[in-house]
Image (cartoon, rainbow, N blue to C red):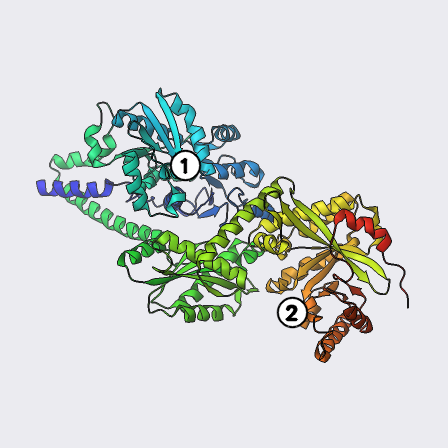
Amino acid sequence: MKAGLLLVFGLTVLALAKPGLARVPPPAVSTAHPVSNVLILASYHDGDEWTDSLVSNLTYYLRGKVNRVRVHYLDARDLPRARYLRNFALYSNGNRLTQYDRVILLDDPALRFYREYTNWFPDRHPIAIGVNDPELAEAGAHQGVILANTRPAVIDTVQLAREIAGRNRLLLVHSASRAGLRLRRQVMPDVEAMGFETVATRTWRALYASDFDASGYTVVALDAPLQLSTMHSADALAAHFRRQLGDFFCALDYLTPFGCVGGSFINVASLSQQVAQRVSKAADPLSPLTVPQQLSLEPQLLNRLPEGVDVKVLGELPGLMPRWAGWLIGGLSLLLIAGALGAWVHLRIKQRQIRRVRHESTYDALTNLYNRQAMLAMLDERIRDGEPFTVVYIDLNGFKEVNDAFGHAQGDTLLRLFATRLRDSVGRQPVAGRMGGDEFLVLCGRETPYPELAELLLRSLKRPFEVGGNAHTLGCSMGIAHYPLHAQNAVQLLKCADAAMYAAKEDREDSLVEFTDAMLDAQTYHAELSNLLEQALAAGGEGLSFAIQPIHSLKRRGWCAGEVLLRWEHAERGPISPGVFIPIAEASDLIIKLGDWTLETMLSRLADEPALAQLDYLSLNISPKQLYTRRFVDTALALAARHGIDPGRISFELTEHVKLLDRSTLTAEITRLRQAGFRVALDDFGTGYTSISFLKEIPFSSIKIDRSLIAGLTDRDAREARGIMDGLLYLVKRLQRGVVIEGVETEEEVEILHAMGADFLQGYYFQRPLAWAAFFAELPAQASRPAVS
């Protein structure tokens, strides 16, 4: 009898203990769910364990309760963090969001996005978790948002820390990021109302760099030192801050690796279970959610707990003995046996569920490769082993364009197909994983021939991917870094490989580049310029201006057109070359914002230039990414109409590398531009490898021949160069395309091209680029005259 009772008791403890790790499985329900689809929105940053934990738990508890769960992160890796899903908002017009019955918002940016685009969502009562901004929370509540307020956990942690530390002076520690500063501002009114003698605040970076004496303070951390963790390991930071601060407390358990000794932690598993139960009901009560908290302390602090502190979560297990256990104690041996058998079956089911959860926490759900957390753990393990190894950081070229143009469904399928080819290329020995988005990582041992592996992968990518009836071609840029040659810890090693990968993108696409120390400086410089350019655009184009280089007609003996060129002079750094800042903008979606500003500003200025009528057209360079927004044509037409500009007076130039994009989309967008009356030119012809079929298929109005094809016309042995130019002019004429020859610098080149029948020339021989005002001042005197025979 006693043995049976002990068995049931032990099995029940196993089933109920550690609710944060061994989660209660969702009950089975019928497939006819009142809620069909659930969308989880969050802003994601590398190392954000709070978001990772919430997403993992929510998807686990929603499984079986709804038909489909979709997670969408609002900011991609290559976007500035202050911009949340701007491109998704522009491309989708909300059509992809109408299918979701319920929405879960995981932070402030997600709630702001929902409030901005409320009409896209059928759900008028979404659930918002972790909203720290009081004004935003109040506005959301008025709008019908169900709030799960996590801020009380911070206040409870402050009170617990004061009672254990016994000090009435408070030090709040936070990161220097905008999120950290915002969190400090939000909790300060509540903290100051708690009656501390002094409330001081410091950033993690400032504390690390100083000898601040915290011995007289109760110390509470608001967030993690993630910025410092890119340069130092968590163990090293924990040791430093424990020496400097002593015992410090926190409200989130992911700070414990950095030295936090405990606090009133938010119970993520229980909170997620509440949210899952709430959203799975068709009729949802609108009352705020209660955020469960779990008191957690390191063992050495338990004896310092004062009287009256609630420590039930540490010492008691509510509901440990079910009601029917009392009947068993009363001597019902038959039910005892049945209960023991049921507990054993339940334990077996839970073990299978735990194994499944562990698999999901290790492998990426989309590609079935190792996920980011698993790859980082393997990196740390290999570094502890001390054996040299190599990491290969891979970024896909062309994926974002396909994802934006054809939707996330085709993008997800494309990633799965690429993962299959990656596995086939690396084989069993190297370890491959997905780091997020379209970035992947391969760990190679000392004996792995990584150059051959990279070459094998590049060869496999030459075969197009067939997805949804479309053929997509992807490339990849790869950066490599070696341990211990380049770095001594995992964070720094990944940073080196990432810098090498970006150098590969700048060097040439589809290449493998090994890390050098200069790459980190270049990456930092590019990040600084990107931020400065973003600030300039936010300030209405501060420091940006236009220059115009004329296009000369030999037959009409004067200027017939002009090319508008963008210039940037920073107040402190001085002039910055377009050859520097344009590629930096191209590397992210900043080029779209820059292109929008350029088009709007140019057309608004042209409205005040009556001399425009003396030119055939003005041309403007645009990025292929602008065409992939599928809104560029409508935007250009609307701006031209607003400012009274004839579309026929505007020509858009695209560089020859547009051939790398999807031809069907490119053809459709250029055709729409031509039908709207705009001109479209293929720029820098001769610098790439455009085929004749490409020129026939894409409806360009003209072709601009690059200087590289005229450089040899004046050489002593110029027969071959002149033959190529003569053939090109004949080909373009037969294709019924206009032609402009760029880079003309000498009178001899002009005479040779004139003899070949060329008419439109551009280059320093005629005129260097002029400032906007100077160009239009010179135009009346330089404008072309009627053609002569």
- Of 523 and 641, the residue lying toward us: 523
Where is residue 578? Give x, y as percent: 63, 54
- Of 442 and 726, the residue lying toward us: 726
Task: Please name the residue shown 46% across and 47% down the image.
Answer: 71
- Of 218 and 486, the residue lying toward us: 486
Vertical placement of residue 566 versus 504, above or below: above
Q: Is residue 372 visible?
A: no
Residue type at mark 1: give it: Arg
Q: Which mark is residue 240?
A: none
Vertical placement of residue 673 versus 259, above or below: below
Quick one: label 2, few (<14), some, or many (20+) residues within 10 Å?
some
Task: Please name the residue shown 43% across and 44% down the image.
Answer: 33
Residue type at mark 2: give it: Thr
In the rendered image, which quarter is residue 748 located in? Answer: bottom right
Residue underneath mark 1: 278
Which secondary structure lies at badge 1?
A: helix
Q: Is residue 75 left or right of residue 766?
A: left
Residue underneath mark 2: 690
Q: Is residue 448 left or right of residue 575?
A: left
Task: Please name the residue shown 71% across and 70% down the image.
Answer: 710
Vertical placement of residue 171 versus 117, above or below: above
Where is residue 288? Give x, y as percent: 42, 29
Pointer 1 with pointer 2, Cβ within 8 A: no
Classify the position of the N terminus by image quarter: top left
Q: Is residue 86 left or right of residue 418?
A: right
